[in-house]
Amino acid sequence: MIEIIPPITDIETIAEGHGIQELNRLRQRYGPGNWKKKKGVALVRTDVDLPAPAEIHWYEAHGIGKVKLKVKRWL
């Protein structure tokens, strides 16, 4: 299990709207919205390790929030 420890810093928008490859799946599963793919840096704790910084990616829409958070690389 992975736990993301707030705050998430250095947040950037990678893609929005039709620039998101998974847009149809996001709308089907979570509903319509102004979807954006974002990235940022946060401390991440795993079951066996101490918290370490990592770059994380997620999708976000107003009124829905952050979904599908994943660690892309350890820093």
Image (cartoon, grey):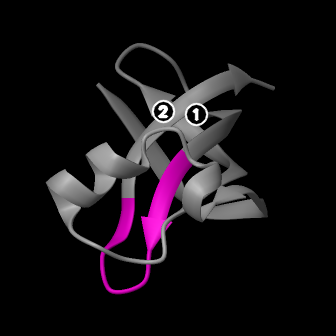
Horizontal and vertical percent position of residue 39: 69, 50
- Amino acid type, mark 2: Arg
Horizontal and vertical percent position of residue 28: 18, 54
Horizontal and vertical percent position of residue 13: 74, 61
Question: Which residue does the numbered mark 2 point to in the structure image?
Answer: 45
Horizontal and vertical percent position of residue 21: 52, 38
30, 45: nearer the viewer: 30
The reply, left or right, for residue 50 in relation to residue 75 is left
Q: Quadrant of the C terminus?
A: top right
Based on the displayed image, in which of its 4 quarters is residue 63 positioned?
bottom left
Residue 59 circle label? none
The reply, left or right, for residue 14 in relation to residue 35 is right
> What residue is rendered at 59% in x and 42% in y?
57
> What residue is rendered at 29% in x and 73% in y?
32
Residue 51 circle label? 1
From which residue to which does the magenta span run? 58-66
- Residue 59 in the magenta stretch? The answer is yes
57 w.r.t. 13: above or below: above
CB-based contact (under 8 Å), mark 2 and mark 1: yes
